Amino acid sequence: MASKEVQDATGEAPSAAEQLAEKRATLDAALAQLDAAELAMDTHRVIALEHEVAVLTRHVERLAASAAVERTAEAKVEAADLAAALREKYADALAKLMPDIEQARLAIRAVTDSVRKCSRTWNAAMRAEYDLKLLHMRFRVEGAPLDVLPLSPVAALQMFFAEEIDRFDGESRTAALPVALVIASDTPDQVAVKEMAAAADFVLSGADPKLSKDVLALCARAGPVSVAASTRVLPPRDDDAFIGPKPMPLPAGAVQSAVGPLAMNEPLTEREQQANEEIRRRNARKQAAVGREVADAAKAEIARRELLQQGPLKPLKGR
């Protein structure tokens, strides 16, 4: 990592990790100033710092994603070599698949030809039995009972194939990739790091027992993907947005308007009017923030349930 003096001399742009460290320091300083403004009850300073902290938090989240992408540079070289080997493996398996498919097609064609011939014979027997039963119904013709007509060839073929296909059905299903929750405001680096984190968590969780040993070993060496945006979380305050029974703060004069006639209410002072506007603005910001968080959480839960509904790969049943 080059120093600031070297970067200034060579014109080299700072890395995402260096920008992230600088923004995190600025964010921590802004949080400390916000705490001091809260203690001093400096309303205008608190509002300004809350906006500054929100902007800095967004910047830190984006830089954290870019820094996470930078950290994968070394592992990416090894991953590229493994990807090349997997491409060769895929091409080899695909080349062997085509003759197997052709052999299976010819075998299925031979089976269907035999079944078609058998079906015609079976249909002749069925029609003779039908005519005989119809004569019995119309003219009460008696005779020795017929041998039982076997199951139709098509029904027998369906039962046989259902049993056989069930044995290797697990090998014929496409494996589902892990789901990453991406939103429209994400930068390309944020999209990349979300997908990286989803893939890392999926592999390390052992959800796919048939995963390639090489991929599993590489992901284990690389470890989980950390996308923590800040080293410190904004402390909760009593006026934060909420979901539940906790009441929102009421503007000045709201109680008097509710319990008494409007004609008897005294006009609000300038300070009360300013307090009303401040509370309305703060509540609107907090409610909007909660709405975004609830929407993101709902999307993540939907994606998680869809992944769980797909379930693990069906194991191959033994013959």
Image (cartoon, rainbow, N blue to C red):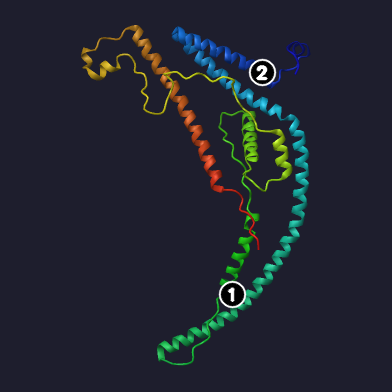
Task: Pinpoint residue 316: horizontal percent, then vertical percent.
Answer: 64, 56
Above or below 106: residue 150: below
Q: Which residue is mark 1?
A: 153
At x 41%, y 91%, the residue is 140
**Mark 1 residue element:** helix
Mark 2–mark 1 CB contact (< 8 Å): no
What is the quadrant of the N terminus in the image? top right
The residue under label 2 is 19
Q: CA distance from mark 2 to mark 1?
A: 73 Å
Which structural element holds mark 2? Answer: helix
x and y percentages locating residue 202 in the rendered image:
62, 40
Of 166 and 129, nearer the camera is: 166
Q: Residue at x 65, y 40 (%)?
A: 203
Q: Which mark is residue 222?
A: none
| Amino acid type assigned to the residue bearing label 2 in the image | Gln
| Residue type beneath disc 1 | Pro
- Of 318 and 52, nearer the camera is 318
Residue 158 locus on image (x, y percent) = 58, 68
Q: Residue at x 70, y 41 (%)?
A: 216
